[in-house]
Image: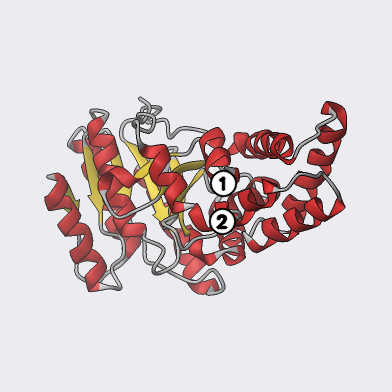
Amino acid sequence: MRVEPPPAGWFGRLRQGLRKTGAGISGLFGGARIDEALFEELESALILADAGVPATTHLLEELRRRVRAARAETPQQVRELLRDVLAELLSPLQKPLDIGRARPTVIMMVGVNGAGKTTSIGKLTRHLQAAGCKVLLAAGDTFRAAAREQLAAWGQRNEVQVIAQQGGDPAAVAFDSVQAGRARDMDVVIVDTAGRLPTQAHLMEELRKIKRVIGKAMDGAPHEAILVIDATNGQNALAQLRAFDDALGLSGIILTKLDGSAKGGVIAAIARERPVPIYFVGVGESLEDLQTFDARAFSQALVG
């Protein structure tokens, strides 16, 4: 069971969300010449967009090769080639969230405070319901009362059950929720966890404990470990990805807040340095603004 592709009209919202980054890149191709200055300006624009040095170097080397091979004569042709190079770099990240390998499919959601994790759970729940899934939510963030209340509100909004405890051990909440998901014949169990900084070793160890306990509740679980990243964090988002991936072995990413203030190029850095699939990107606050990642559409929106 796969999540549906983005609806018509979503590309416009994505392009609007990337308008600041896109303007900085697409504006370079308005001249009449292909010269070294164009490549230098493009290098600066990509780094300012948080693509990072390794990804920027790769993109420009490949772009130069293709410009020579195609004997490109105009900046517009260079832009088309850049769009192709970027789409190919990002293509390994384009992998849909595939539900149904196990029943229930257990999804563990992680991320730092403020990344939009609980909101993403609510939106993901709606997506899964649209695909015909029965979903159970686990309020595994037992440290922050507001997190439980927020998840409960999403449960009410989506008319799904939420397993919650006041205080207590988050691993125990996760265990009980997986057991309940099996007993109630659910398709998906989504386990929320407390936001934390990846530099807090004891909290990262707790995440590993939650993962182990989920595995005791159901062999092979969790089937997905998804990191929610705030795109406005730029290169810090890449540091978060490394830390959480090292701790848990991530299966996917939800990239939030591509809403006009984000630079967007961090996706290129992810593709080059830690190519964990991006299941969804968020370009706004509405339920419909969390959509499956499309490498070609993203490249078109970013480059113009």
**Who is closer to the viewer here, 132 or 224?**
132
Find residue 235 and report its image quarter.
bottom right
Point out residue 3 in the picture as x, y percentages from the top left corner.
Answer: 36, 31
Q: How many marks?
A: 2
| Residue type pointed to by label 1 | Leu
Query: Can you see residue 41?
Result: yes
Q: Is residue 35 left or right of residue 196?
A: right
Q: Position of residue 191 (x, y in %)?
A: 33, 52
At label 2, counting other C-alpha atoms closer than 10 Å, the crowd grade (few under 14, some 14-19, many 20 or more) is many
Assign a secondary structure to mark 1.
helix
Q: Earlier in the sequence, mark 1 or mark 2?
A: 2
Looking at this view, is 186 or 88 the one in front?
88
Task: Give how far across and how far down residue 236 sits, in percent.
Answer: 59, 67
Q: Secondary structure at mark 2?
A: helix
Q: Is residue 223 above or below residue 200?
A: above
Callout 1: few (<14), some (14-19), or many (20+) C-alpha neighbours within 10 Å? many
Please, which residue is most extreme toward the front here? 32
Which quarter of the figure has residue 92? Answer: top right
| Quadrant holding the N terminus | top left
The answer to which of 201 and 48 lies nearer the viewer is 48
Mark identifier at residue 302: 1
Please tell me which residue is depicted at 56% across the width and 54% down the height of the picture.
Answer: 23
Amino acid type, label 2: Thr
Considering depth in this image, is 87 or 123 the residue closer to the camera?
87
Residue 177 visible? The answer is no
| Label 2 sits on residue | 21
Q: Is residue 263 left or right of residue 259?
A: right
Q: Residue at x 69, y 37 (%)?
A: 76
Residue 101 place in picture, x, y as percent: 40, 27
Q: Are marks 1 and 2 in contact (CB under 8 Å)?
A: yes
